[in-house]
Image (spheres, rainbow, N blue to C red):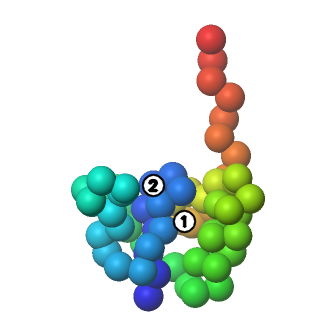
């Protein structure tokens, strides 16, 4: 099964690793293959996915930073 954790981190193994081989910390949740494919499509198009309060959010919008 695929997993998701944090912002824009998905994978087919737990733990999910960053580009440097380090495991991503946070709450891992198991997602469906349909959500995994949807997440890949969003990430490729420059959008975001996020795990928040144990829920997987497709199309997450990053809140604007306060100055």
Badge 1 density bin: few <14, some 14–19, many ≥20, Cα 10 Å = few
Describe the element under mark 1 as helix, strand or loop: strand
| Picture quadrant of residue 36 | bottom right
Residue 41 coordinates in the image, percent (x, y): 70, 70
- As rendered, which of 20 and 56 lies closer to the eye? 20
Reading the image, the residue beneath label 1 is: 55
The residues tagged by marks 1 and 2 sit, at their Cα atoms, a distance apart of 10 Å
Question: Foreground mark, 1 or 2?
Answer: 2
Which residue is at 43% across, 62% downward? Answer: 5
| Picture quadrant of residue 47 | bottom right
Sooner in the amino-acid sequence: mark 1 or mark 2: 2
Residue 28 coordinates in the image, percent (x, y): 37, 67
Disc number for residue 42: none
Position of the C terminus by quadrant: top right
31 sits left or right of 45 in the view: left
Which residue is at 65% across, 60% downward? Answer: 43
Residue 38 coordinates in the image, percent (x, y): 68, 75
Q: Is residue 32 above or below residue 19?
A: below
Q: Is residue 37 above or below residue 61?
A: below
Reading the image, the residue beneath label 2 is: 6
51 sits left or right of 16 in the view: right
How many numbered marks, from 0 up?
A: 2
Describe the element under mark 2 as helix, strand or loop: loop
Residue 25 coordinates in the image, percent (x, y): 30, 55
Q: Is residue 1 above or below residue 3?
A: below
Which residue is at 63% across, 18% downward? Answer: 66
């Amino acid at each position: 099964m695929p997993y998701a954790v944090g912002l824009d981190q998905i994978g087919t193994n737990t733990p999910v690793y960053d580009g440097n081989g380090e495991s991503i910390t946070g709450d891992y949740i198991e997602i469906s293959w349909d959500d995994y494919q949807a997440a890949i499509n969003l990430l490729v198009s420059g959008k975001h996915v996020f795990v928040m309060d144990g829920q997987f959010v497709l199309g997450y919008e990053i809140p604007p930073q306060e100055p």
